Image (cartoon, rainbow, N blue to C red):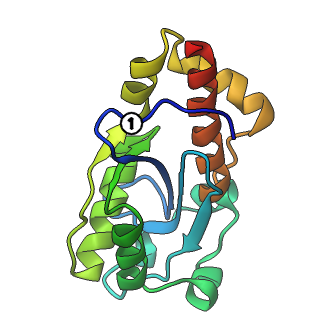
């Protein structure tokens, strides 16, 4: 990829996106996508934990992300394994999201079910953008959406976050 500015604190720059069973207070994560600047994004489906109720499943959410509860049961990864993978990946990273309130809540639910603590903090990507360009996040997201549309699938949405950051870096040159 193109040249990048080194992170000011020496930590890697990472991006995360979560999809969920819905938007309500009992909703839970169903897919986690993550990636680092300059590296391919990845994702994992999350197997429903015994403490997560299907009453929190919203059909409108399923229509957006196109992931069924049955798919999660068959293809999902246990919350503990997902949490440990994220902790290993983000051990030396600042992690950015475009919706840290929602993603932070679903990460809390994930780590609570896993019985471990997250070893990273979540930041708003707007704060990262502000360190490299005067362009507005809204403008950068609109431009990125033309190349990497927001799809409500975690890996694709992380690719959009990566592109937003890349566009911000290009603006700074």
Question: Looking at the image, is 57 positioned above or below residue 143?
Answer: below
Question: Looking at the image, is 166 positioned above or below residue 123?
Answer: above
Where in the figure is residue 133, as x and y percent of width and height?
Answer: 49, 14
Question: Looking at the image, is 172 positioned above or below residue 151?
Answer: above
Q: Residue at x 61, y 32 (%)?
A: 3
Number of disc labels: 1
Q: Residue at x 33, y 69 (%)?
A: 87
Q: Is residue 124 left or right of residue 18?
A: left
The quarter in which the N terminus is drawn is top right
Where in the figure is residue 91, as x and y percent of width and height?
Answer: 31, 63
Where in the figure is residue 135, as x and y percent of width and height?
Answer: 54, 11
Task: Please tell me which residue lies in front, 85 or 170.
Answer: 170
Q: Residue at x 57, y 22 (%)?
A: 168
- Residue extending farthest to the top is 134
The quarter in which the C terminus is drawn is top right
Where in the figure is residue 166, as x and y percent of width and height?
Answer: 61, 31
Q: Secondary structure at mark 1?
A: loop
Q: Quadrant of residue 164?
A: top right
Task: Please tell me which residue lies in front, 66 or 9.
Answer: 9
Q: Is residue 66 left or right of residue 29?
A: right
Question: Looking at the image, is 35 positioned above or below residue 71?
Answer: above
Residue density around tag 1, few if under 14, some if 14–19, many if 20 or more, within 10 Å: few
Q: Residue at x 30, y 67 (%)?
A: 109
Q: Quadrant of residue 26?
A: bottom left
Q: Which residue is mark 1?
A: 7
């Amino acid at each position: 990829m193109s040249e990048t500015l080194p992170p000011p604190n020496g930590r890697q720059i990472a991006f995360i996106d979560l999809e969920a069973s819905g938007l309500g207070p009992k909703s839970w994560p169903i897919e986690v996508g993550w990636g680092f600047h300059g590296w391919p994004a990845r994702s994992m489906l999350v197997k429903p934990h015994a403490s997560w109720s299907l009453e929190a499943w919203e059909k409108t959410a399923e229509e957006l992300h196109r992931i069924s509860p049955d798919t999660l049961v068959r293809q999902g990864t246990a919350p503990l394994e997902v949490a440990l993978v994220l902790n290993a990946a983000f051990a030396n990273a600042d992690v950015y999201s475009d919706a840290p309130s929602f993603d932070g809540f679903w990460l809390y639910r994930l780590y609570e079910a896993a019985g471990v603590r997250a070893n990273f903090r979540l930041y708003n990507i707007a704060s990262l953008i502000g360190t490299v360009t005067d362009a507005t996040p809204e403008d950068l997201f609109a431009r990125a959406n033309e190349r990497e549309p927001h799809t409500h699938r975690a890996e694709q949405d992380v690719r959009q976050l990566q592109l937003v950051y890349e566009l911000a870096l290009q603006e700074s040159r």
